[in-house]
Amino acid sequence: MNTEQPTASAFDLRPHLEFVKAHKDKFKAAIAELLTRKTQQEFAASIEVDAFNEYPQYQGSFITSLLTSMPESLVAFSDLEQVWSDKHIIVPEFSEDGNWTKKVENVSPESYPEDQYEVLVGYTSEKGDKIIQSVIPEHFTDDPEAIWIYQTHVFLHEFFHTIEVNKRTVEQRSAMRFSYKGQTFNFQEWLDEFEVLLLSGEEPESVSYYASVYKDKLNSTYKNQDAKGYTTALMEQICETFVAYQLNIISNPNAWTNFKEAANQKWTLMDKLCQAHPITNS
Ligand SMILES: [Zn+2]
């Protein structure tokens, strides 16, 4: 069976939005805390944030504020140049067997069916230079605040992709170097450590609803069958772990609300990467 692509249920946002709604105060406090960091003003000013003007769910100025609060270690290696959205809803296309074809369609809010709940809230270009975000249809939830909170989750997830999606060779990853507490490490070494932890099964292997979509692919059998699909599955786990680390909460099927307690080893690894200093030639 071809299980390479997530199926339609993976894009059903209702459980994610329900979780956010149930823990809204925690999410809002986490986002407010995140926005106090403001160490990356120069980087944030260099990123074009386009076409959000008529986008009431999620403001361009808010994205710029989020960018100022990203970790220095990741900003140094991010390929991001532009964040873009207009009033379209980005709808994933599915084949007859229900798997995502990796294609999307831009649909106007007026023509999106009232009885559907699948959206691709965001994606990153293959070069890592552009994040594209979707409108979330309003009938998905009765709480409009849950929508922008979930948009924030997706933006953070995509931000992590901008540091890695265009650097998937061992050479490229090894060239991304960091210092942390007097020691140096590179991104490949960090990924290897993360992979060992994930495969050990010592902690709940999926940190979120979205990460759990890929959990069947995180094993050595699948890695041997389809190395590229395996890398995708691994990176999705890591992007979700980055969101969980930044907010200390993420919509998840196990109903935990404190990431540091629920998955302390993953928290510790992500903390190491996010607190490290980048070693760059410039
Ligand atoms: Zn992703």
Image (spheres, grey):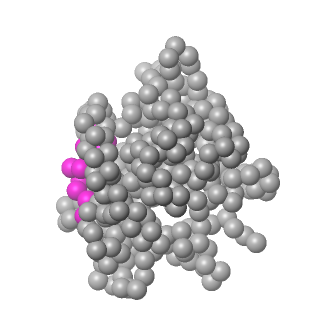
Q: Quadrant of residue 113?
A: bottom left
Which segment did they paint magenta? 57-68
| Residue in the foreground of this view, choosing between 181 and 162 | 181
* Res. 188 in view: no
Q: Is residue 72 left or right of residue 279?
A: left
Residue at x 69% of width, y 67% of height = 3
Q: Is residue 97 above or below residue 232?
A: below
On whether residue 58 falls in the magenta region, the answer is yes
| Residue in the foreground of this view, choosing between 221 and 170 | 221
- Image coords of residue 255 (percent x, y): 48, 58
- Image coords of residue 122 (percent x, y): 42, 60
On whether residue 266 falls in the magenta region, the answer is no
Magenta region's main secondary structure?
A: helix
Q: Is residue 279 above or below residue 250?
A: above
- Image coords of residue 50 (percent x, y): 27, 55
Q: Quadrant of residue 59?
A: bottom left
* Res. 177 in view: yes
Q: Is residue 196 above or below residue 234?
A: above
Residue at x 78% of width, y 50% of height = 220
| Residue in the foreground of this view, choosing between 113 and 149 | 149
Quarter that holds the N terminus: bottom right
Q: Is residue 84 left or right of residue 193?
A: left
Residue at x 43% of width, y 51% of height = 257
Quarter that holds the C terminus: top left
